[in-house]
Image (cartoon, grey):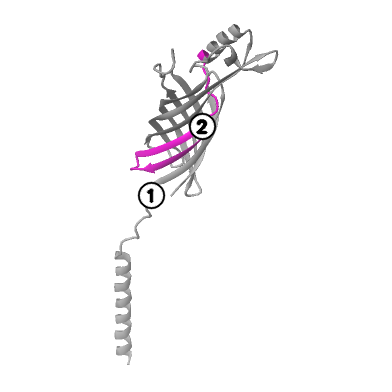
Amino acid sequence: MKRCACVTFVLLVGTLCVGASRAYAQDPPPAAPEPRLSIQLDGGPTLGHKSAAFLSGELGWRLNSKLDVFVEGGHMTNVGTSLLETNATTIANFLSASVGSTGISVNHADAGIKFNITPPNPMIHPYVIVGAGIAKATTEVTFTVNGTVIDPTDRVSLGGDLSGTNTKTILIFGGGITFPFAKSYFADFGYRFGGILSRVSDIENDITIKTQRIMFGAGVRF
């Protein structure tokens, strides 16, 4: 009886050891795939001759750890230039009036590449971007006499440098830092320079509009 019990015990221990060795020999489960799609909203001030604000949305797709592609669309409320002020003043003097307000609002859509820089630590992800697209720039100027807005077209015809909407090319450059949090979310702080190229074929003596945006954004990865 004791001999049978010993044999049974040895067989049991051997079975458990074999089972344990097989369990340890199994490969670990594969890691979850890294999220590739990202969606974010951005806003903040614009800098330049006229300081105003902007709002934009961005859709990104991760190609690999170093490269993303993105598509962006947004609105800048006023990127008016010093040349616009000068031209408006010339017309105001002709009308014996004052310049009430000047502004260039811009709706833009662009696409480009984001270069991800190796982060100094897991919580800081720096990047630089380059892109290009189209910008629909609308110029508006008002004139006043004794504080009352007047219609200048009764006496003068305003050119494209003072009124109207034009579609132009925009080039985007910039960079920033993202901070991941809560597993799938991230905050984005950055800077964007946008050059809205001139169109002298449509506007005489037109110049490139240089836009600057300080970006505060938040997004999610899928």
Q: Quadrant of residue 12?
A: bottom left
Residue 10 placement, left or right of 193:
left
Secondary structure mainly formed by the magenta segment:
strand
Closer-to-camera residue (36/162):
162
Q: Which mark is residue 34?
A: 1
Q: Name the amino acid, label 2.
A: His
Highlighted magenta segment, given as a residue range = 55-83
State the image coordinates of residue 187 (x, y, percent, origin top left).
50, 40
Q: Residue at x 58, y 7 (%)?
A: 94
Q: Name the amino acid, label 1.
A: Glu
State the image coordinates of residue 221 (x, y, percent, origin top left).
44, 47
State the image coordinates of residue 130 (x, y, percent, origin top left).
38, 30
Closer-to-camera residue (36/133):
133
Dot 2 falls on a residue whose secondary structure is strand
Q: Residue at x 56, y 23 (%)?
A: 51
Residue 58 placement, left or right of 11:
right
Reply yes or no: does residue 180 show up in magenta. no
Q: Quadrant of the N terminus?
A: bottom left
Q: Which mark is residue 75?
A: 2
How much space separates mark 1 and mark 2, taking CA atoms? 31 Å
Reply yes or no: does residue 70 show up in magenta. yes
